[in-house]
Image (cartoon, rainbow, N blue to C red):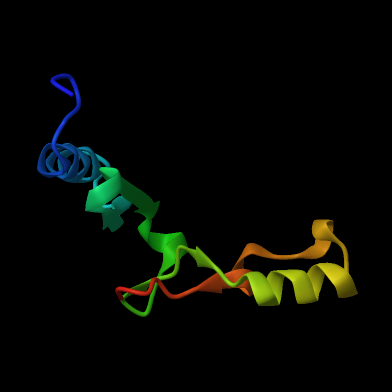
Amino acid sequence: MENVPWHSDVKEFSEVLASKSGGVYEVACEHAHSCCVLLAKVDKFKINGKWHTWIDYDRFHELVSFLSIYFVAQADILADNPSS
């Protein structure tokens, strides 16, 4: 475990990386136990100040059964992040 970074280090690196994007990306969510940080495009996934990076699987399956996987738009299956 000596070569595994701490979550705080991963988060700090992610924040620096996002800041270098000029506001295009921000930290959308994190999971400390897994040592994961999600960077997401602000203009695509931050809607009215809330992150929408989760998938509404019920809505996804409803649309796929009615249409086709090729006609399901990403915006139709986005869901709020639980922590937002």
Residue 48 location, x and y as percent?
A: 36, 80
Residue 4 location, x and y as percent?
A: 20, 26
The picture quadrant where one finds residue 67 is bottom right
Position of residue 81 relative to residue 22, above or below, is below
Residue 2 location, x and y as percent?
A: 13, 20
Position of residue 33 relative to residue 74, above or below, is above
Residue in view at x 63 percent, y 63 percent:
74
Residue 79 location, x and y as percent?
A: 51, 74
Residue in view at x 28 percent, y 54 percent:
31
Q: Nearer the viewer, residue 50 or 3?
A: 3
Quadrant assignment for the C terminus:
bottom left
Q: Nearer the viewer, residue 34 or 76?
A: 34
Residue in view at x 64 percent, y 69 percent:
57
Residue in view at x 59 percent, y 72 percent:
56
Position of residue 3 relative to residue 10, above or below, is above
The picture quadrant where one finds residue 62 is bottom right
Would residue 4 appear left or right of 80 to someone viewing this image?
A: left
Quadrant assignment for the N terminus:
top left
Give the farthest residue toward the bottom: 48
Give the farthest residue toward the top: 3
All told, the count of numbered labels is: 0
Would residue 44 appear left or right of 30 to someone viewing this image?
A: right
Would residue 19 appear left or right of 72 to someone viewing this image?
A: left
